[in-house]
Amino acid sequence: MVSYSKAKILVIDDEDALRGAVKRILEREGFSVVTAENGARGISLGTTDEFDLALIDLKMPDYSGLDVLREIRKHKPNTVCFIATAYASYETAVEATKMGADGYILKPFTPEELLNHLNSGFKKRVLILEAEALKNEREARLLEIAFERTRLNTVIKSLADGVLVVNTDGEVVYYNNAALKYLNLQDIVIGRPILEELPREIQDLIFANFTSEITEKKSFSVEVEIKPKHELVVEATLSPVLRQSGKLSGVVIVIKNISEFKKVEHLKSQFVSMVAHELKAPVAATLGFINIILNKEMNLSREQEVDFLSRSRVRLGSLLNMVNDLLDISRIEMKTVMREIKKLDMNQIISDTLGMFTADIKKKDLTVIFEPKENMPEVRADHGEISRLVTNLVSNAIKYNKQSGRVEITCCQQKNYAVLEISDTGIGLRKEEQEKLWGEFYRAKNEFTKDITGTGLGMPIVKRIVDAYSGKIEVESKYTEGTRFKVYLPYNLTDDELNN
Amino acid sequence: METKKKILIADDDPDILAQTKLLLEERGFDVIPAESAASALKLFEANDIYAAALDLIMEEMDSGFTLSYKIKKTEKGKKIPVVILTSATYLTGFKFDATTKEEKSWLKCDAILNKPVDVEDLLMKIEEYYSGTL
């Protein structure tokens, strides 16, 4: 409720005595009174200040009361105006009312007559103001709703997921640009049927939703390959939209791009099948030997039996190595074991590694050249991982070397990197072999490698360790002549970088 | 003396190759072992082969298929059974078979056996081929 304890009134009259009398009467009744002695002054006051009421004399020397009324109404339409006149005529009354006068007061008037008119006028003024306030409030709310709608629109439009709303007639009610993109459609038109253009899987799901009795809000998802070979795979989730009556009015389809996820999933399952296949080979070979040995019909010689048993032992040994390598890979990948970062003396690690291979070096009559550099800065890393890296590289340099060949190892500082170089005079790698070197289970197959056992996981492990320390590894090789690996390990890694 | 029937075996696992060889020799066959698809093709051309059993994955993921296709393209190859040995269902996630006519038409082999292969199964497939029941 709008309430005014004190009504503000403008009294416009050229008669000084009347003006003064009216002012006194009204002020006594609690009005706040402003007076104007002529039409011009009345217009000036009435159009600039906000009055609840105005009492306007019809006949003034400068302006007609009707002109004053018109001006005030024009600028302050909510001011309740009364025309006061002694020369009442029907025509002027009609004219004044047309122009928006709220009443007509006949002169001379008694104070009671005046107050009656003005009090009812003031009531009217209060009602006008209340209506005005309500109107403003409503407009503000409408504005707010419009704003909300725009905001909601903006939010949905900028969602990364696609949104498509379809009614029970199969027509588009709403969509966003992501929906267009993820459904690989040229155009979606609101109000047009869309079902035919949707992928089969989504259509089926929509039909299932439309035809079955839906009593509860339940979503259904389906994976759809929009572009083949994992280029664009989406997950569409359908939720029914129910009216208040519980009747289905349509469905909301949220379309999420899951291509990357599918790619990773595919790589992972490929890796798993590759592992299974690689593990199966030595098991199958060993099982085959055992079956033959146990088969009495085969009449094996003692020599053959021993040969088969020792072959089985080799295969089982390589199986165990492979399992160990796989465990290492999963450790590096899953980072289940927090790295124990210590300052490492690379020279020490290389010397220790070479010590482990003394027997193999002797057997192959290899010349190993390693001269530790003085004052090498220490590398901050996990000892186990760096040892593993050096071991795998040294092991390959020995394993794939020629009889009486050479292995050269250097480790030095180059700017921010510790650079480890290991070169051998071994069988080398062909160009295509160099490219496949980092792939799991890849083993170069040629006349030289036939009798060398390996898991095909040594280099992938090296690569993973190097990557884990933001380093890099380079390979230079000439087939039949030898291979050189260069590992760059950065010095200045922060603790965060080391643990990620 | 009757000449023994020659079976060409291609497998890049030397142990499996040796075992299959031994088992087939025991059954009275002459075995021609090949450790790669390339040498298998050469040995097929140079010998009078009665049947061929080829490992699917050798140098490449589909070495066996390619080799089988090459063998089956020749006049000689059309007259002998070619069996592909595989554990590849694990690798591709697809199960494939050579039982229907359509599959045989694009797989270019007469049968597919899962590894490890039972020599009895292999010999049965070969027998079925020659008796026309495959």
Image (cartoon, grey):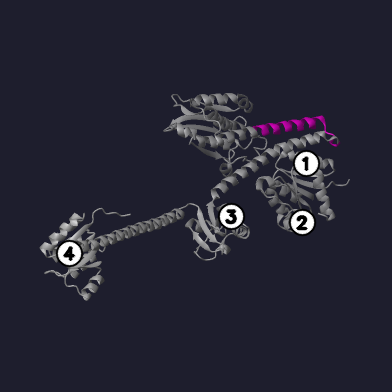
Quadrant, the N terminus of chain A: bottom left
Q: Which mark is residue A43?
A: 4
**SS class of the residue under badge 2?**
helix
**Residue that badge 1 annotates:** B20
To the question of a shared chain for discs 1 and 3, the answer is no
Give the magenta part as a residue range: A297-321
Q: Which mark is residue B78?
A: 2
- State the image quarter where residue A398 is shown: top right
Whether residue B94 is visible, yes or no, is yes
Looking at the picture, which amino acid does disc 3 mark? Answer: Glu
**SS class of the residue under badge 1?**
helix
Q: Are marks 3 and 4 in contact (CB under 8 Å)?
A: no
To the question of a shared chain for discs 1 and 2, the answer is yes
Looking at the picture, which amino acid does disc 2 mark? Answer: Lys
Residue at the (43%, 55%) spot, across then down: A154
Near mark 3 (Cα within 10 A), the count class, few <14, some 14-19 or many ≥20, is: some
- State the image quarter where residue A97 is shown: bottom left
**Residue that badge 3 annotates:** A225
